[in-house]
Image (cartoon, coloured by chain):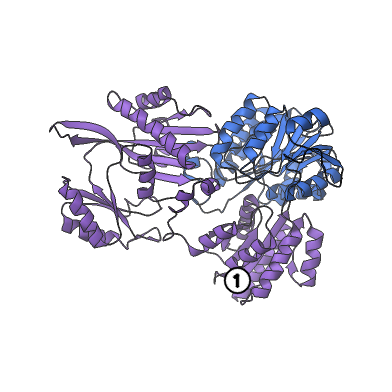
Amino acid sequence: MSILVGRDTRLVVQGITGREGEFHTRAAIAYGTKVVAGTRPGKGGQTAIDGTVPIFDTVAEAVKQAGANTSVIYIPAGGAPDAVLEAVDAGIKTIVCITEGIPALDMIPVVEAVRRAGARLIGPNCPGVTSPGRAKVGIIPASIHKPGRVGVVSRSGTLTYEAVQAMTDAGLGQSSCVGIGGDPIIGTTFLDVLMLFRDDPETDAIVMIGEIGGSAEEEAAAFAAEHLKGVPMAAFIAGRTAPPGRRMGHAGAIISGGTGTAAEKIAALEAAGVRVADSPTQLPRLLLEAGYRA
Amino acid sequence: MKIQEADAKSLLLAQGLPVPAWEVARNPDEVMAAAQRFFNSGAGRVVIKAQVLVGGRGKAGGVKLASTPDEAREVGSRILGMDIKGITVRKVLVGAAAEIVKEYYLGAIVDRASRRIVLMASAEGGVEIEEVARQNPGAIQRASADPEMGLLAFQARGLGLAIGLRDPLLNEFVAIAQGLFATMKANDADLVEVNPLAVVAETGSDGKLRQRLVCLDAKVTLDDSALARHRGLDALRDLDEEDPTDAQARKLGINFIHLDGTIGCMVNGAGLAMTTMDLVKHFGGEPANFLDVGGGARHETVCGAMQLILADPKVKAILVNIFGGITRGDEVAAGLIEARALQSRKVPMVVRIVGTNAAEAARLLEEAKFETAASLDEAAEKAVALAKGAAR
């Protein structure tokens, strides 16, 4: 088992013929991910990736003819919201949107449509999900992973890689690594992923990577305090020294009633029994201190 | 992107919101002439407000009243050129001073938690809303707009009632709240704030005193990701207040924030860039900047970003930290080599490139004799040592 993606994943790549789409599809296939289709409107009937992946005009055809059940989106910001809605309409239940730079207001109705369809959107502006040894959907480099039983969830892209690398270097493998994305409007939150990890029989410990702004880390901490007692957890929060007011929006600070600084997030996590690292490289040691044994 | 009060007011006016007339003046003579026009049309006093993109201008002395055109000129000459939180005031807004009966707060934001546009209102207007949120969070009322249908009239009415408004001001409030929502949508704003939304007393043409709600101040920030589809809005960017490096960074498509330290940082990803800064501080150094080259940066972007870092004379050492996912290590290495060929000033540098195409990057860097580091902690520690060595 693992969460979100795994051996049962049959992936359709929306935007398979683009520079990023093609590059990362090759890496996904090399990792063993079942890539069953790609889409590129107007190029249906052709093939991609040296003739190994059939191209369809629509996601609906990829579902019908190739049995796709998961989608990954490498389409520029202007077309990405539509790509998510097309995947929802085709009945795809797990949609990973890598695209960055989508206007926040475009995502509000999209996230709502995804929710109403009972589907799950990861991202946008995220690195994707890897379940080591099973499937890799997105842009997280394959080489940093090792199969195991630690669940990793992160709001940040490259910082996720840093944390995963540190885990692997210390011999701690991962069940699934999920990058939820750093945009204001995202489909899946820390809380959602923590629930999935809680219910996954093959995840025994959790690493969470947060950053300043918003209150998602505090909500996750509250959940952990109540529902993840006895699960070894370690976290890292980026932005301890970030200048106030520059990155963290005025509005974010208001809605969370004054929360949003690294210090507040760290305090909330520590109060929930989560160990918080000073550097991502300390995460494996903190997990071991929390009682985790690989 | 932040825009000036006067521009924010224009956006509100375009949605039909009640905004009292104003003029923008750039020198004391223009202030006097504008004030004269407001006095001619019946104003008892005028207000002169510094146009700067930072909060707290009232406390800093950037908002003043005047009773005559001469006084307006004198007040204008004091505010223009004033320094507010490091920003020189280059223009002021002039308008008739309102007779304020009561002040409310009304704002619309993109709310991360509910993933909707949320309107917030409070009867405690005219003060910083963060302060209200901290001291009396119960005084802030919220309504979250439907993702498809928007802010419905009954929701706006509920907000107005909750902050104590009654007929006839309640109906005015509903129109204003829906207008704020419309302003948000029409311009892809992240934030639209009216503080104060004021009840003002006015003498009508029939000589009778009446009260109405008006937007006395306006603050709008625009979603940078959506500017491309609002050609007109990009012209509202205040280039006077923009650091020249900000403009260059924007052209390169990178995220750059200038800081006061000596260690220039180039990183991919905002989270990792903040972490790199945190670790530089942890090891006793001071970062000179926050720089996220973004996902999938090409060599020319890397080269341009490096020149931006080098343009800061305080930079004594440079730390490059790239964990490639969508970014390819060899592209970054090629950009660094390109930048060094163009470089006139010698600054020690430590480079760490891992992830996608790291092996190719390592080969390029070794051939070009760059100093490298394997781990994030090692890279930060080395950069701090290099900066201290250079300072000696």
Q: Which residue is rendered at x = 15% and y = 49% of the image? A: B40
The one nearer the camera, B328 or B265, is: B328
Residue A150 seen by the camera? no
A41 relative to B310 in the view: left or right: right
Query: Looking at the picture, does residue B261 appear above or below residue B112?
Result: below
Query: Looking at the picture, does residue A208 appear above or below residue B209?
Result: below
Q: Which chain is blue?
A: A
Tell me if mark 1 has few (under 14), some (14-19) or many (20+) residues whose alpha carbon lies within 10 angstroms of its own: many
- Report the chain holding disc 1: B
> Looking at the figure, which quarter contains the N terminus of chain A?
top right
B175 relative to A257 in the view: left or right: left
Q: Tell me, what hue is chain B?
A: purple
The residue wearing badge 1 is B316
Q: Which residue is rendered at x = 38% and y = 43% of the image? A: B128
The one nearer the camera, B100 or A106, is: A106
Q: Which residue is rendered at x = 80% and y = 49% of the image? A: A144
Query: Looking at the picture, does residue A186 appear above or below residue B279?
Result: above
Q: Position of residue B230 (x, y in %)?
A: 49, 46
